[in-house]
Structures are given as C-alpha cells and as structure tokens.
Image: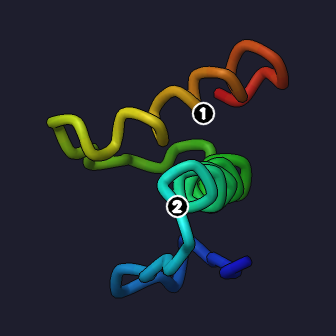
Amino acid sequence: MNEVNPSTMTKPIRIVSSNQQAASGEAAQLVASAIIEQPNLVLGLATGGTPVELYRRLSQMHQEEGLD
C-alpha cells in the first residue's frame, strides 16, 4: 500500500490494481489515513460514477469505525 503524508503530499498518487474493488479499498485507506493525520484536511472530491465505490467505502468507515 502507498504511504501518504498529507502535510507533504504535492502530487497525486497512482494506484494500480487488478480491479475496482481493490483500488477503491486502497484509495479509501489512503484518504482515511490522511483524515486521521490531519483532521482539518480539506478534500476536493470528484463527481460521476468512477469514485462511487471509494465513497461507499469511506461512508462505511465512518459508520463502523467513526472516521470523521
């Protein structure tokens, strides 16, 4: 898995995976780690169908683990 340090992140991280489920899971972990490290983090989120699984995973983390 990619490591992320939100205070020094200056460019996008590319996730290469065999399927959307795995890629969305890894992306959700990266976003969650960034939120936990920097609670006042401001996210710019994309619209459309591509990121729906990522958003579903983040919502699940919020409900089950209290990610906020």
Q: Quadrant of residue 45?
A: top left
Label 1 crowd bin: few (<14), some (14–19), many (20+), radius 10 Å: some
The residue at 15%/36% (across/down) is 48
Which is more toward the observer, 65 or 9? 65
Residue drawn where x is 63% and y is 77% of the image: 5
Could one spot residue 7 in this view of the protein? yes
Residue 67: % across, % down? 71, 29
Residue 28 higher or lower than 67, as above or below: below
Describe residue 65's horizontal placement relative to residue 41 as left or right. Answer: right
The amino acid type, in three-letter code, at marker 2 is: Asn
Numbered mark located on residue 29 in the image:
none
Q: Is residue 12 above or below residue 36?
A: below
Position of the C terminus, as image quadrant, is top right
Looking at this rendering, what residue extends furthest in the top direction?
63
Task: Say which of 10 and 46 sits in front.
Answer: 46
Closer to the camera in the image, 63 or 18: 18
Label 2, secondary structure: give it: loop
Which residue corresponds to the image point at 27% horizontal and 45% vertical from the top-left? 50
User: Measuring 17% from the left and 37% from the top, which residue is drawn there?
Assistant: 47
**Residue 15 in the image: x percent, y percent?**
49, 77
Query: Which residue was labeled with disc 2?
Result: 19
- Circle nearer the viewer, 1 or 2: 2
Residue type pointed to by label 1: Arg
Give the residue at mark 1: 57
Q: Secondary structure at mark 1?
A: helix
| Image quadrant where residue 46 sits | top left
> Which x, y percent locates residue 41?
48, 50
Q: In 3D space, how far apart are the residues under numbered discs 1 and 2 (Cα atoms)?
A: 15 Å
Name the N-terminal-most of marks 1 and 2: 2
Residue extending furthest right? 65
